[in-house]
Image (cartoon, rainbow, N blue to C red):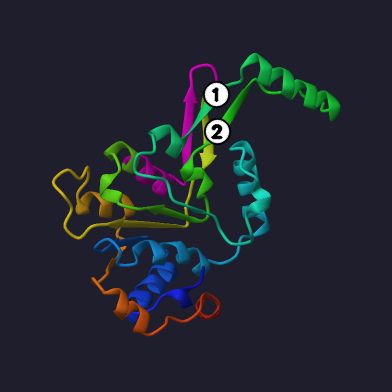
Amino acid sequence: MDFSDVRGLPLDILDRLILAVRQGRHILIEGPPGAGATMIARRTVGLLPLLTAEERTDLAFLYAAAGVGFARIPVLRPFRAPHHTASLAAMTGSLRNLNPTETQLRERAYRRLHHPFTAPRRVILPGELSLAHGGVLYLDSADEFPLRTLQAVQQARRAGYVRLYRRDTGWVPLPAAPRLIVATMHPNPQWSSACSRETIADVLGDPVRIELPALALTDMARGERWPSTAELRANLAAHR
């Protein structure tokens, strides 16, 4: 996905995206459905610098613990887009005991590898906040997320990690510092929305605000095309 796919939207929107990346701020996008918020958000990962070796090592641990193949992740930073119905545990992660069958399989694998340690009897399951570590966390329809979930996002943004707790193990910290959080919401939230615009702005901490106009498909098709992601990333790198 490339920014050159975007057409018809004003270029000052792109200027505000670049401003957010340069200043290390998060982004709040408001616009009607179909205005292009998701299209823009999915391409923001291309504006961030490539992963360092240390960051890839951290992410390899997190993705291996989550059972997600890290080999599928390129040198670009991760992009995670949890649904607003995701549970709090799905966002922050959890600690789970292995059942007897899983324990036997792991111990057999450890013996095959001549591993000097006993196979663990519990596993850490990183949540979306940890899987977005160093990358982009996209909160579509952020006003529909439960307040507890948004508070967890706010705590991770401030601390850079989440802490999982079990009575038998105590607190277990996990890295959870998305480099960029992009939240979207309707410009006129419904009365049923869980959170207000001010609440979401507080969660993001002085975000760069972007308002998308309502454009017809013909306007998007005939409009000016944005620069490519490669051009934008090179321009950002030259000014770092």
Badge 2: how crowded within 10 Å, few (<14), some, or many (20+)? Answer: many
Q: Residue at x 64, y 40 (%)?
A: 64
Q: Residue at x 27, y 39 (%)?
A: 147
Q: Which residue is mark 1?
A: 96
Q: Nearer the viewer, residue 148 or 169?
A: 148
Q: Amino acid at mark 1?
A: Arg
Q: Nearer the viewer, residue 198 or 146?
A: 146
Q: Is residue 100 magenta?
A: no
Q: Is residue 218 above or below residue 145?
A: below
Q: Secondary structure at mark 2?
A: strand
Q: Nearer the viewer, residue 196 or 82?
A: 82
Residues shaded magenta: 151-169
Query: Would you identify the image quadrant in which residue 78 lies?
Result: bottom right
Q: Looking at the image, which residue sits at the far top?
A: 100
Q: Is residue 206 left or right of residue 230?
A: left
Q: Looking at the image, which residue sits at the far front?
A: 218
